[in-house]
Amino acid sequence: MKTKKVLLLSLLLLSVSLFSDNLKVDSLLNVLDSVINNKAVYTRAKETRIDSLNYYIKVAKNNDEKYQIYRALFGEYITYNLDSAISIAERRLDVSKKLENKRRINTSKMNIAEVWAYGGMYKDALNILDSIQRTSLEKNQYTYYYHLYFTVYDFLSNYTFKQIEKIKYSNLMRQYKDSLLSTIEPKSIGYFFLRSEVFIQQENFKDALIQVDSAYTLFGHKSVEQNPIFNYSIATLYKHTGNVELEKKYLAMAAIQDIRSATREHIALQKLAMILLMEDDLKRANRYIKSALEDAIACKTNFRTLETAKVFPEIISAYDQKIENEYRQLYISLLAITILTLLLILSIFFIYKQLIKIKSKEKSIQEINVELKTINENLNALNRELTESNYVKEEYIGYVFNLCSIYISKLDMFRKEINIKIKLNQTDKVFKMINHNDVIINELNEFFYNFDTVFMKLYPGFINEFNGLLVKEEQIIPRNDEILTPELRIFALIRLGITDSSKIAKFLNFAPQTVYNYRVKMRNKSVLPKEDFMQAIQKIGLNH
């Protein structure tokens, strides 16, 4: 239980301090709506980049240049169109073989395996990866190599139906994730992403959160939040901790980045649509799942298409049901309006008859007016009494502040006396006066006694009402030799309208921190919520 509380507190602090923009979820969803509206713009920008690269292929001077251009083209196509991606990967492999470059051949083969993996051809992807001799790979190729194995087994563990195979693929996926972590560049965004994924799978959300925190600290908010994969990972973290609003926030951020980059192989929009379906935001859910399905079909990712298509009928059915319910509600509303109109006509007829009766009772109304006038006069008299009572209270308050003025004058006389003795070089008498605290203590005690006496005349039920705001075990009972305790005196000043801790501290000869501590201590002992406690103090004595 303690660990869970620490985690929830950490998540709260993270949401307040780490995420710089603090956009409301509704605002992000509005941005996402706008981005989907402009999806064609991002697609055209993507096509323009692709057309430029295809042009450079035609004018390439040699196979080395072609290889580099194919590399860029593959990056554009892999999450955009798998048919084109496989074609580019195969051409890249042909060029690599002509160059007789083992490193490039291996990279090109892994490109083909990546396409097969995203296309749902897991066996073909594994055959290609298995055909690559691990010893032929260069050191910086292992990250990509293990990433592909991890991705294939991750897909297989999620989409296989047999439990024994699911366990087998999950174990292999974890093994390759460990291998990937051992080769990926430490302290990179990808490294923190993988580490957080490992902890999420272990249900160790506290350490997963630490990885996210570390990424934000090292790379800044902008770099991390522009990474849709990391945003999706953060959303998964919040899903496991039950924070639906923050899960929606980071799914929306991931979906926005995916669409802006014309990425068609994505899952964030689909997951967001499912949450909105559960929240009955059917219009958005319907729109988002349609957009996700369109992208999956255009990208030729069969497994993602099937996954999205499974959700699509459920959302469409719910959306149709909502429309039907709205029509039914409209029919009921029209019927209700008709009935109300008839009732209104009957009411008008009834009121008309009542008006006739009222005219015959004008004399009674006049008598009632006379009685009301008498009551009004009595109320005015009562108001005058209340005004007089307020005046008495003002006099008491004036007495308190006059007493303060007297003490200030005494202090000034004391200062002047010290000044004279210093000028007469009577320093021994000065030290004796300064070190003699009895007078000051007696004056303070007399001041507090007078203050307490006047205040309790103003609010005789203050102690009982104040204790009524506290739990029974923490109620304050003054000793026989005191009227108010220091705690009660602080809140007495607050009741008089003096709420500044530094002013209260000066008034009571306390340190400001002491006043603050007393205030916090009393709030913590209150039976009321903290935000209601101070308002209740201000209302003490209003019923007297």
Image (spheres, rainbow, N blue to C red):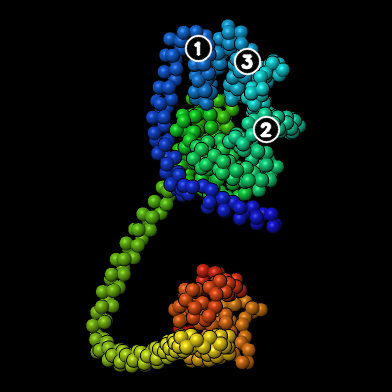
Q: Earlier in the sequence, mark 3 or mark 2?
A: 3
Q: Which mark is residue 181?
A: 2
Q: CA distance from mark 1 to mark 2?
A: 32 Å
Q: Earlier in the sequence, mark 1 or mark 2?
A: 1
Tell me the residue at 39%/35% (across/down): 37
Tell me the residue at 55%/43% (across/down): 216
Q: Is residue 354 above or below residue 108?
A: below
Label 1 sits on what residue type?
A: Lys
Residue 433 quadrant: bottom right
Q: Are marks 1 and 3 in contact (CB under 8 Å)?
A: no
Tell me where residue 81 appears, x and y as whole percent. 50, 22
Q: CA distance from mark 1 to mark 3?
A: 16 Å
Tell me where residue 382 appears, x and y as whole percent. 36, 91
Label 1 SS: helix
Q: Number of marks in the image?
A: 3
* Residue for badge 1: 66
